[in-house]
Each structure stands twice: as C-alpha cells, then as structure tokens.
Image (tube, rainbow, N blue to C red):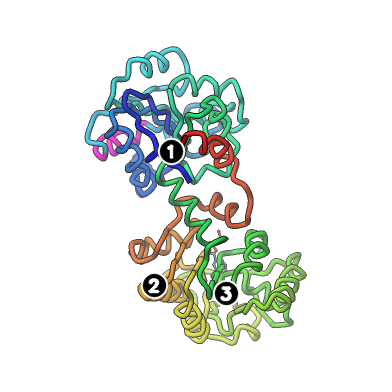
Amino acid sequence: MKTIDDYNFKGQKALVRVDFNVPLDDKFNITDDTRIRAAIPTLKKILGDGGSLIIMSHFGRPKNLPEVKFSLKHCVPLLSQLLDRPVLFAKDCIGAATKTMANNLKPGEVLLLENVRFHAEETKGSENFAKELASLGDVYVSDAFGAAHRAHASTTVVAKFFPGKKMFGYLMAHELESINKLLNQNKKPFTAILGGAKVSGKIAIISNLMNKVDNLIIGGGMAYTFIQAMGGKVGSSLVEEERLDTAMEVIKEAKVKGVNLYIPVDTIIADAFSNDANKRNCDIKNIPDGWLGLDIGPETEKQYAKVIESSSTILWNGPMGVFEMESFEHGTKAIAEAVVRATKKGAYSLIGGGDSVAAINKYKMTDQVSCVSTGGGAMLEGLEGQVLPGVAAVEEDVEKIAH
Ligand code: AMP
C-alpha cells in the first residue's frame, strides 16, 4: 500500500480528510482527544515537506444546519498546540470566503474548515459539493478511517477530482494494514473475542471470521441468546428471541468448520440492572427468574484467559459485561489483561469497536496491545470483508502515484 511517504508535498496545498469527531463536555471542552492526536503524524509530514494544510472533518450529527455544539472551532486551540503554529478557521467548508482563505495559504500554514455535515450534500455524497471541496486543494489525503465506510462527499466522492493525486495518510494506512494482517496474514492460533450487547450487531463479522479463526470466544449480552438457544434458563437476561436460530446456526457452523466455540459457563447475575444491585455468581444455564446476567463469571474468565494466552493473533471486539458499572467490569478487565499478557509473549492483538476501545483506555492498556482501532463501524465492516467506499475511491489511483 502506498502512502504519503511516497509523495513530496513541497509547495502543495493538501486537502486532508481527518476524523476530528471528538466528544465534548457541556462547556465545549474536548473530553477525549485521541482522534485529533491520531491525525497529527500525517499533518506534520505534510507541513515538514513544505506543504500547507486544508483540513476537513465531520463533527457529530448535526441536522444539516450550523449548530455551536457541532462546530469544529472547538478543536482549533488543541490543533494549534499540537502542530505548534496558528490554525486559521473557515466558518464554512465551501464558498467564496473559504476559497480565498485557501488560495492565500502559504507553505507551512494550516486552515481548518467548518464541519462538512453542516451541508446536507455531505452525507448525500453530492458531486457538486465534493467538487467545491476539491477546488480548495492540489492533492487529496484520506486519513479518516472512522468515516471510511461512508460514501460521503468528503470521504469518497471528492477523491475522483484528484486523479493521480490522492493517497492515504499514516492513520488510514496503519488501520488498513491491521485489518489485512488479521484477515490475510494471521499467525495461528487465531482467536476472536466477540462481546457487546447483541448477536444481531455481530452476525456478519462472525460469519466472515468463521472461515479464518481457530477459536471464537463469545461474551457480553449476546451470550444469553446462545444459552437460551441451547435450552438454558437465562432469567431476565438480554435475549434476542428472533436470533435464537442464528445462534444455533453459528454453533453448527463452528462444528462443521472445526472452530472451537467458547460460550460462558458461569455468569455474574444481578437482581436489577444497577451497579448497586445484589449480585452473585451462577451457572449460566440456570439463572433464576427475576435475575439477569451482567458479566462473565470467574470460571469463564479462567477458561478464556487460557485460550487467549496461547494465541498468536487476537481480535477483540465488544465488552464481556456491563463494564461501565464497576460491579460488572471484572470479566472485561480480566480479558483485557489476558490480551496484554498474550501481546507481551509475541501475539498480534487488534482491539476495535467503540466499547472495547473505551475499556482498554479505561484500564490504561492502550500501549500494551498491538493496535487499537480508531474506527468502530469502519473496522467492523472491514473485518466483515466489505470494501470500504472511502478506501476504494483512493485505491484506484494509489498505484499510479507510485510511478
Ligand atoms: P456493542 O455496542 O454491541 O458492542 O455493545 C456494548 C454494550 O453492551 C456495552 O454498553 C455493555 O454495557 C453492553 N453489555 C455487555 N454485556 C451485557 C449484558 N450482559 N447485558 C446487557 N448489556 C450488556
């Protein structure tokens, strides 16, 4: 894969699509700056070459009209600090005033555009809107992995206006390499750990992984659908009645394909969905009426940790329980610790999907695994084997750039 390393940006205005969709508190302070920091190496490389930056991003889900809480101006101070220079801000991502600002940019200067989603044309993938964005820069750099699964104007359509002059930034390249490493170059044994709330959200990824993994570990809310499908009693635990057949099919398919499928044997049950509820350990097939399973139990933790620690490739997506509540985070934490131990022994580990990333951040283990993906939906679609539109739009040309 060719990246910005194959290009010299001297004297060029780079139109860079990043993902600055960071969370804000009610005073508009950034509460987690991971996504902004993740884009900095790409931005610095372009500036270091003697190029200038026109940065565009979406921010939240505005209803196609400007709203203060979705303004990218809140990112200016931090961006300016991280790039160690002033950052100009364009109040609209298109229009005459913005065009003038872009035209006047000198090498080393930085212009951040207002939220592209303040225009309905962005999510519609409008060609005219994309053309206006494209008119601002000489070269297009795609570094918004978190938005690469969207065929929007600034992530995908805009690329067609840069024949021979479009490429991936470092973040995008790194994320695509980790998906490729997992799907196509994995060392065995390969273990996928899937948790989170529902079977329905994970079924496509389960199907694709079934052809690749040696071990498939199930945890979180979706485990109870499997248990009920197998005839167990799950009390008031989360169950998707309409997915009972799906769960049985997964069990059958694993058998046919020789995949070791791990389903929890014990669970921490509670008498209410609350951190202060009464709780105890329980055989997962015999949960009393009125009680619900909110975490995996100690026996399951032990079993899972053993499998994880003897793996060479690990994918983890989705928490093992309601880890947001301290009373039910033990299982998720134990799995995170096992992934870290396996990584120390030489395994390649990729953590992806919003909540497992939040968990690994919470336990301050981000630097102790191989890769923490910045894009939940994009990573899932990539692992499901789908072509990401934002990737395809740039890849068309990537080979041409190299020559
Ligand atoms: P997902 O977005 O599908 O990965 O699901 C993540 C969410 O699943 C988290 O907010 C967890 O609190 C929730 N979750 C995990 N285990 C359970 C469970 N046993 N019952 C209900 N929700 C759960």
Q: Earlier in the sequence, mark 1 or mark 2?
A: 1
Please give the residue where the numbered disc 1 appears in the rendered image. 18
Q: Residue at x 58, y 34 (%)?
A: 152
Residue at 62%, 56% in the rendered image: 384
Where are the magenta residues, as a range?
A: 73-82
The picture quadrant for ligand 1 comes to bottom right
Of 81 and 145, the residue lying toward us? 145
Foreground residue among 26 and 223: 223
For the residue carrying disc 3, how many other residues have a C-alpha within 10 Å: few (<14), some (14-19), or many (20+)?
some
In the image, which disc is placed on residue 217? 3
Label 1 to label 2, Cα distance in Å? 32 Å
Marks 3,2: beta carbons within 8 A: no
Q: Report how far apart the C-alphas of labels 3 and 1 lie in the structure.
A: 33 Å
User: Mark 3 or mark 2: which is in front?
Assistant: 2
Residue type for callout 3: Ile
Residue 96, percent across and down? 44, 12
Q: Nearer the viewer, residue 100 or 176?
A: 176
Mark 1 or mark 3, which is nearer the start of the sequence? 1
Whether residue 276 is visible, yes or no, is no
> Residue 161 lies in what quarter of the image?
top right
Residue found farthest to the front? 403
Point out which mark residue 346 bears.
2
Residue 274 x/y as whole percent: 50, 69
Tag 1: amino acid: Val
